[in-house]
Image (cartoon, rainbow, N blue to C red):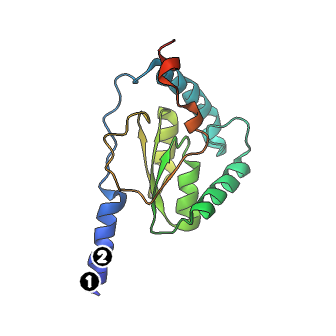
């Protein structure tokens, strides 16, 4: 029994439990990020309560279906620790917690979405963070990385500088 306990403790310590949020950004890296943060804070204010995430064109049950399909596609297990880039209102990681038993670490630029997610999560962590700078994250820490719709918001350096 002891070796099994220590194995579980080692997995618990390595996969997620020691990971902290970065310091809050004083300024976003680019104006584009700051502008998007304002937009998604407004979405979060009206959509998180509906479990509709930060999407205004999808119904709440569609978010559950999307989360199910994502986790089925990657073969998520209860022992997995998953990184959600652009976690919005935390719908995907809460699905992971409730239906699969896993946990995760989500980042978003919406402070309202992050607060909403943290209050409703049982095992996952959510952080306000600039997804264009992940140097504070350790490498080889997550079993999977997911992102639904957020990657399309990445800007090119040319567009962000008004060229």
User: Image quarter for residue 26?
Assistant: top left
Q: Quadrant of the N terminus?
A: bottom left
Between the residue at mark 1 and the residue at mark 2, the CA separation in whole angstroms equals 6 Å
Is residue 112 depicted above or below 146 in this figure? above
Q: Which residue is mark 2?
A: 7
Q: What element does badge 2 sit on?
A: helix
Left or right: 46, with 127 as reference point: right
Could you say which is closer to the camera, residue 96 or residue 140? 140
Task: Categorize mark 2 by other alpha carbons within 10 Å: few (<14), some (14-19), many (20+).
Answer: few
Image coordinates of residue 39 in percent, x first then y, are 58, 25
Q: In the current view of this chain or complex, which residue is farthest to the bottom?
A: 1
Could you say which is closer to the camera, residue 82 or residue 93? 82
User: Image quarter for residue 17?
Assistant: bottom left
Which numbered tag is attached to residue 3?
Answer: 1
Is residue 66 depicted above or below 33 in this figure? below
Residue lying at 51% horizontally and 34% vertically, measured from the top left: 112
Residue lying at 50% horizontally and 21% vertically, measured from the top left: 32
Contact, CB < 8 Å: mark 1 with mark 2? yes
Could you say which is closer to the camera, residue 35 or residue 61? 35
Which numbered tag is attached to residue 22?
Answer: none
Q: What element does badge 1 sit on?
A: helix
User: Image quarter for residue 68?
Assistant: bottom right
Q: In the current view of this chain or complex, which residue is farthest to the top?
A: 163
Image coordinates of residue 134 in percent, x first then y, are 37, 39
Could you say which is closer to the camera, residue 56 or residue 82? 82
Image coordinates of residue 74 in percent, x first then y, are 57, 61
Image coordinates of residue 70 in percent, x first then y, are 62, 56
Task: Categorize mark 1 by other alpha carbons within 10 Å: few (<14), some (14-19), many (20+).
Answer: few
């Amino acid at each position: 029994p002891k070796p099994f306990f220590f194995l579980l403790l080692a997995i618990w310590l390595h996969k997620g439990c020691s990971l902290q949020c970065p310091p809050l950004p004083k300024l976003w890296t680019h104006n584009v990020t700051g502008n998007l943060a304002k937009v998604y804070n407004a979405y979060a204010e009206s959509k998180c309560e509906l479990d509709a995430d930060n999407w205004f064109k999808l119904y709440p049950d569609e978010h559950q279906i999307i989360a199910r399909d994502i986790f089925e596609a990657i073969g998520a297990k209860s022992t997995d620790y998953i990184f959600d880039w652009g976690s919005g209102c935390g719908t995907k990681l809460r699905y992971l917690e409730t239906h699969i038993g896993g946990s995760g670490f989500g980042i978003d630029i919406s402070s309202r979405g992050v607060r909403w997610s943290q209050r409703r999560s049982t095992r996952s962590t959510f952080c306000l963070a600039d997804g264009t700078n992940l140097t504070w994250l350790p490498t080889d820490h997550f079993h999977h990385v997911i992102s639904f719709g957020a990657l399309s918001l990445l800007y090119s350096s040319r567009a962000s500088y008004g060229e």
